[in-house]
Image (cartoon, grey):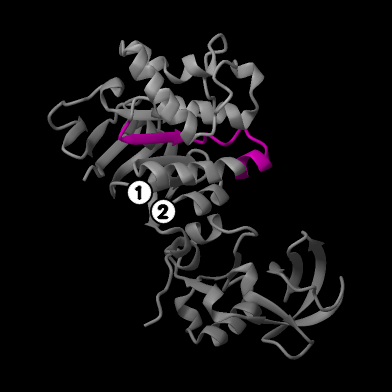
Amino acid sequence: MSEIKIKSIIKNFGGNSIAVDNLSETFPDGEFVCLLGPSGCGKTTTLRMIAGLETPDRGEIFYGDKTFFSSKTGEFIKTENRNLGLMFQSYALWPHMTVFKNIVFGLEMQKKSLDEKEKRYLELEKLFHLENFRDRYPSELSGGQQQRVALARMLAMKPSLLLLDEPLSNLDSNLRLEMRSELKRLHQSIGCTIIFVTHDQMEAMTLATSIAVMNKGKIEQIAKPMEIYNNPKSLFVAKFVGSPQMNIINTDKERNLALCLSKKLKIEMNKVKNFGVRPEAIKLVQKNNGDIDATIETIQPTGADWIIGLNVSGKSMFLISSEQPIGKENDTIGITFKEEGCHSFDSNDLKIVKS
């Protein structure tokens, strides 16, 4: 088993900004782990330290029985000796080389025989559906085709670990959907460990076997995608994961609404700083028939769903529903809250677990 183990890693780029703050985590062998978070949270720096492209100020990084880095012993394995595949936003295909030459480029550097290169190319050609592209140049390929070539090139040398830094960010929405399916299929086919950096929660939710949500150089929570969504451990995770964003109700500023939720969830108000309500946990009912009344401010049909903006006791909220809304804009209606989509957070912004 070749798990990745990070122990007490610190990286500071100068000043008061710590990019990665005493990070310790273990990523099990064979997982598809997404490092998810906003810009500047430390996710790319973490990936680059695993890759050997950045040197930590302190700490240790292990991969199986190999010590990639240790500030205690001074050990450091160079990137080219870590047996990993790297892919970034730019695919960096050689424009003057054909698809075949791009894919076998690493094997060429290793002075592999023509038969070895041909055999590996045919394996990857089949895996990535690149038949009939052998003699084409990158400029003759679509964005999705270029990405498949870049993935094939990354796998040509049979790395045991794949590190991908926002590789889908330059694609349009349709191609991103196609390539998410491609990456999912790739992981299922080869079974190696993948670390994937993204700020896009849709990518993380659809691709990952585990999501590590990062904030200010630390991992706030690591868990399976639906566990992250349904049971966020902190207010930050609750707000960052979900679209539309979770509705946050402050117990001091939105007192009437907070009292309603306190009663609904059977929790004492003095224990709670903020309530969180998922948009799909709100249901429209007739006026005076719900937990509280609200005014419809906006109605946005998206095709499959409706996103409805509400004013609830002066608080703007959003709900999402697959049902056509009762009422129209400026109507007063009732709303009910589904308990499974409602959360409460304490003064430290940590989720309150009901006993």
Name the residue: 48% across, 84% down. 267
Image location of residue 324, percent across then percent down: 80, 73
Residue at the extreme bottom of the image, as rendered: 289
Q: Quadrant of residue 76?
A: top left
Could you tell me how far apart the alpha carbons at marks 1 and 2 are, in whole angstroms?
6 Å
Name the residue: 30% across, 44% down. 23
Residue bounds of the magenta highlight: 159-177
Residue at the extreme left of the image, as rendered: 73
Name the residue: 41% across, 59% down. 224
Residue kind at label 1, given as amino acid type: Glu
Image location of residue 9, percent across then percent down: 28, 39
Q: Is residue 233 positioned above or below 130 on the image? A: below
Q: Residues within 10 Å of mark 1 (few under 14, many from 20)?
A: some
Image location of residue 98, percent across then percent down: 54, 14
Check residue 31 in the rendering and tell me which mark sits there, or answer none. Answer: 1
Please say whether residue 212 is one of the residues in the magenta stretch. Answer: no
Position of residue 42 in the picture relative to residue 193 (left or right): right
Disc 2 marks which residue? 209
